[in-house]
Amino acid sequence: MEKKAVQNKMGTAPVKTLLLSMGIPMIISMALQALYNIVDSYFVSQMGNEIVSGGMTLGECGMNALTLAFPVQMLMVAIGVGTGVGVNAILSRSLGTGDKEKAAKIAGNSIFLGLCTFIVFLLFGLFGTGAYIDSQTNDPVIRQMAVEYLGICCILSLGISLYMIYEKLLQSTGRTMLSTIAQISGAVINIILDPIMIFGLFGMPKLGIAGAAYATVIGQYVSFILDAVFHYKYNKKDFATSVRYTKPDLPVIIEIYRIGIPAILMQALMSFMTYGVNIIFGNVSTEAVTAYGLYYKIQQFVLFASFGMNNAMIPVIAFNYGKNDRRRVTDGVRYGMIYTLIIMAAGLVLLQVFAVNLADVFALSEKTGELIVLSIRIITVGYLFIGANVAFQGIFQALGHGVASLIVSLLRLIVIDLPIAYALTFLPNADQVIWWAFPAAELGAMIYSILFMLRIHKNQISQLRICEDAETLSAEITAAE
């Protein structure tokens, strides 16, 4: 096993600027990921104004279908991102300790796990989409559109399953700009292809909602291919990228999932929450379901930006925790929290100011538009709570407390949120007040996060060494060897 002191920028650059240099590309990358869903929704909403079912236009039926399919798309992301979180944390930690052989095994096994994820969703796309959509709607038009869209996304999910893995491998070594280039390229392709494939422009056949699915999938494959090329070209400078390392190694897989499974469950809870909200809001009105689906996609621009900073925090904190450097771990916690709160505060202001303008972008009924504006007005009240929770979850994951991070997600997305939302459906003005369930859940989760963070600081962070600089620690490691 090869071990030596590694002078990676995550262990030497000033943390305040390091988080920005790594985080800004990730924020752009995550915002563009949110753009996939917004672009699909916008063009689908323009498919037609003719009434086709239950007083709804073809465009509104299409948007409702996207909302019903969205939880499974989120689940794909959850498994990829969650696995990537485990890879990110332990690979960065291995590089911090100079263990290149282990880093290579972690990277190779993560690719193997990405292939396994694809197989699972391929089977679901072939055999499970109909039953899943039937659990949320009995409208035949919406059902047909949702099954068609979701089936394409699942059967052709190799792109999304692997691009998220390669993206995390680039982020683990600090090469966030390369992963951002790949993400931008895929998003641009998706934006270009959406109107062409949905409406049949430039000689292409008019595919409708299936065109939205194909445009999304093609964009994902573009990101996957570029991320893979960047990984094999540049990450070999930090560890071996030979295909032989993709051979399954059970101890490595267990270590990845020790952090990754709680992270997968944490991300998957967003999918389960959306599925539960679709059912609960369906008891209020179809317009409430559509409004929530569109609000959630608008919110993703802000929420995913905070996830971008979260993704920058994890490798920085984990790397310096591996180095046993208390000062840099503390700085990572402090500035990661500050930057995340700034992002959410900016999002709060922007969404409040432009709530009406955002609702007007889509071709919606008057009632649905009003509910979107109302949802923005109420839910953004809890954005600072969301920011704190997202930052705490990144800190917990980086320091090996995946279960604590999972508990935060359970509280904010399931345990507090859904019961309150369900209770509010019994009020006569349910469509007006049901949105308060979301900020209430974030506040409850934040209280737990603060208490657990105090425990971590006392028992873990305060026990680390205070290193004057990277060179001093490197000399100590060399002398010890």
Image (cartoon, rainbow, N blue to C red):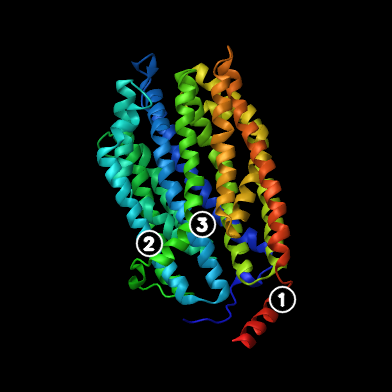
Question: Helix, strand, or loop for circle 1?
Answer: loop
| Mark 3 lies on residue | 259
Q: Quarter holding the C terminus? A: bottom right
Q: Mark 3: give few (<14), some (14-19) or many (20+) Cα within 10 Å.
A: many
| Mark 2 lies on residue | 111
Amino acid carrying label 3: it is: Ile
Q: Which comes sooner in the sequence, label 2 or label 3?
A: 2
Identified at 46% across, 27% down, the residue is 278
Question: Helix, strand, or loop for circle 3?
Answer: helix
Identified at 65% across, 72% down, the residue is 12
Q: Position of residue 350 (x, y in %)?
A: 65, 36
Identified at 37% across, 44% down, the residue is 216
Q: Position of residue 51 (x, y in %)?
A: 35, 16
Is mark 3 in CB contact (under 8 Å) with mark 1? no
> What numbered label is drawn on residue 469?
1
Amino acid carrying label 2: it is: Ile
Separation (CA) of disc 2 from disc 1:
35 Å
Amino acid carrying label 1: it is: Asp
